[in-house]
Image (cartoon, rainbow, N blue to C red):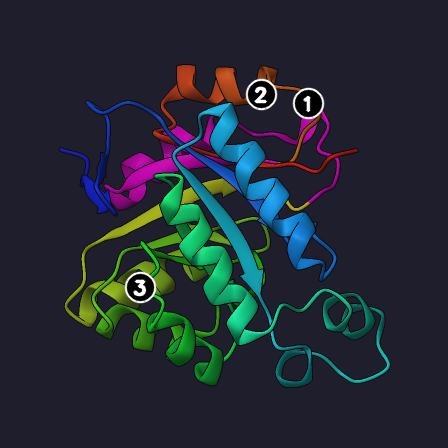
Amino acid sequence: MINTIKVGKRKIGNDQPVFVIAEIGINHEGNVKRCAQMIKAAADAGVDAVKLQTIDADANYVKGSESYKVFKGAELSVDETKEMFELAKSFGLEIFTTVGDFETLEWVNELNPCAWKISSGLITHLPLIERMAKLGKPALLSTGMSDIDEIEDAVNTFYQNGNSQIGVFQCTSIYPLKPENMYLFRILELKKRFNVTVGFSDHSLGSDAAFLSVGVGASMIEKHFTFD
């Protein structure tokens, strides 16, 4: 039997409605007013949750690199992040975020996110995953930049630290994602291999891939969006 997880007030699993996550990430580009508008738009669209990326550029990227410039220019302050969490909850949405370092993990935890998102690039950061597990919240794991052994190590790290609340996303780290690179049948492989709730992190244009992934067995959909 596939492991069912609980994210906020919602159970997620084979016998549950699909859990839909609007991925804001850093698409607000550091503009807290735009972030608020995106949260409202997501709520109006009827999603279950919104997700941000709370990445401290100084702690995660080499200064002067392209990634540093992008993430440094898109940071929300602690107070702004708290405001966005409160706003999302006022709309009845679950909210959580991706963090990349221990200090950020600790202050975001005080905002009571419904879960942790472990991005593809962080799947081998086992000390961070271990700390997340010990905090007692569920985690959703993207797999786009990992092999099967790395996924197994991350899942086992969560289990070994007394937390079985983990879900896995089939994900291909290409933007935008073309149909030939979706590999939706990997959803079945991930379910069989790890006995966990599996979703689809959709980087494609349009909505067809999301619908198709549910047909294959996805219980969660994460969809990136902007106002463009």
User: Magenta span has 25?
Assistant: no
Residue 153, horizontal then vertical, whole percent: 36, 65
**Which residue is pictured at 67% across the width and 20% down the height?**
206
Give the camera-side residue of 6 and 213.
6
Within-10-Å neighbours for mark 3: few <14, some 14–19, many 20+: some
Within-10-Å neighbours for mark 2: few <14, some 14–19, many 20+: many
Which residue was labeled with disc 2? 209
The answer for how far apart the CA atoms under marks 3 and 1 are is 36 Å
Whether tag 2 and tag 1 are in contact, CB under 8 A, the answer is yes
> Secondary structure beneath disc 3?
loop
Q: The residue under label 3 is which amino acid type? A: Asn
Front disc: 3 or 1: 3
Which residue was labeled with disc 3? 112
Which residue was labeled with disc 1? 179
Whether tag 3 and tag 1 are in contact, CB under 8 A, the answer is no
Residue 127, horizontal then vertical, whole percent: 39, 80
**Which residue is pictured at 71% across the width and 25% down the height?**
205
The answer for how far apart the CA atoms under marks 2 and 3 are is 31 Å
Residue 149 drawn above or below residue 71: above
The answer for how far apart the CA atoms under marks 2 and 1 are is 8 Å
Q: Which residues are magenta?
A: 174-202
> Secondary structure beneath disc 1?
helix
Query: Tag 1 or tag 2, which sits nearer the N-term?
Result: 1
Q: Is residue 212 left or right of residue 126?
A: right
Q: The residue under label 2 is which amino acid type? A: Ala
Query: Is residue 172 shown to the viewer in this render?
Result: no
Give the camera-side residue of 29 and 55.
29
> Secondary structure beneath disc 2?
helix
Q: If the image is split into quadrants, where does the N terminus sit?
A: top left
Q: The residue under label 1 is which amino acid type? A: Pro
